[in-house]
Image: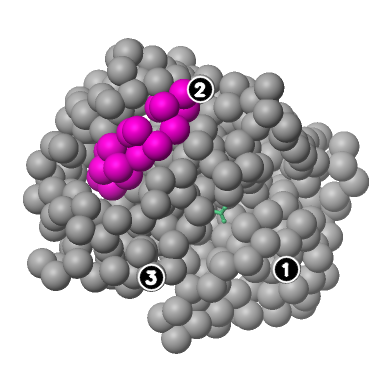
Amino acid sequence: MNLFNYNALPINVHFGAGRLKETASILQEYGYQSVLIITTPEQEQDGQKLATQLGELCVGVYPKAVMHVPVEVANQAIAEAGRLGVDCCLALGGGSTIGLAKAIALKTALPIVAIPTTYAGSEMTTVYGMTENRLKTTGKDPKVLPKVVIYDPELSLTLPAKISACSGMNAMAHAIEALYAQDKNPIIQLMAIESIRALSEALPQIVQDPHNISAREKATYGAWLAGICLGSVGMAIHHKICHTLGGTYNLPHAEAHAISLAYSVHYNRNADVEAMTKLAQALGGEDHTQVGQLIYALNQKLNIPMALKDIGLPEDGPQTVARIVCDSPYYNPRAYDYPELEALLQRAYQGLPPQ
Ligand code: NAD
């Protein structure tokens, strides 16, 4: 066995359908007494319901989280947390909401309790992001890592089928890239494979019936494991492509991940044969050369957008993205080849199978 390092991040997880009801006692268990609930405007009502449930433990709901954490939004939220004198931020929502709580924590060192309602995985990482003058910068800081995470799969029942599928494929992308990460290790690989299996079983069931609670439980479990992967090891070409699609063209985060994943893994299919064979097997195939087609077929089953042009990439996008990716690459197990990457991104633009 090769040498490896493994560092577990210190997060307390409470998992299971219906656990939202325990939020007050969980907060008390950790000593939090005056909590600010953060949500998006769309999830404000859920935040208000939780506030009522928490009674005196909650001092307010701040329903202003938006995608990519604009710095003005972060500054207003930091001021509000200071004005209210809270001792904890409770993020109820997806990556955007948790992102705003992280921006507050970065400045104030306030602890975060996260209650995720999508599969994006931010709650398991020390990564924060902020946007100023249309430029998103990211960084890592242990201060932004949630202290406590409550995973209640019932909260995802309201997430529409298409968003669930894309968000689930966003999670799967974290697990897949962990398989061939520069700092991969056997523990994270076990979690990654378990995550890929759980997500690939659960997502088609959710698309058929978004109210299938056992599928929701399995997807939440898979997403948690994928979040651990994202928080533990470095990502590669796929995440670089998606950060470029989001940063340069403002494409929707989960959809961009879902569509591009088939092409990224196809690009890497021969680069780490052991990892790609494990991936093929977890997806129900056998051969490492099939991985791109297996993800493409899964996306077809999930009925999600298949082409980058359908989610807003302009015609010259593939060349520009390939150029940016090759000029400022992340680690990848295979060297960056501009013509091949551009040709693959052209296929992703059209929604054609990777080949
Ligand atoms: P999101 O948080 O932007 O949510 C999308 C929409 O879905 C919002 O309107 C939200 O209110 C709504 N929503 C969320 N859960 C719902 C539910 N259960 N029912 C109904 N509506 C619901 O989407 P996301 O994909 O979770 O997060 C994307 C953002 O997170 C991006 O900015 C991305 O960069 C960031 N992110 C960060 C990390 C990290 O480690 N820092 C990891 C993953 C994603």
Say which residue appears at 38% left-offset and 70% top-offset.
327
Q: Secondary structure at mark 2?
A: helix
Quadrant in which the N terminus is drawn = top right
Choose between 50 and 190: the one closer to the eye.
190
User: In the figure, residue 99 lies in which quadrant?
Assistant: bottom right
Choose between 6 and 34: the one closer to the eye.
6
Residue 351 visible here: yes
Hey, what amino acid is under mark 2? Ile
Label drawn at residue 106 = 1
Query: CA–CA distance between discs 2 and 1?
Result: 32 Å
Residues rendered magenta in the picture: 259-276
Query: CA–CA distance between discs 1 and 3?
Result: 30 Å
Residue position marked by numbered label 2 in the rendering: 193
Residue count near mark 2 (Cα–Cα under 10 Å), binned few <14, some 14–19, many ≥20 = many
Q: Against 235, is 17 above or below?
A: above
Q: Are marks 3 and 2 in contact (CB under 8 Å)?
A: no
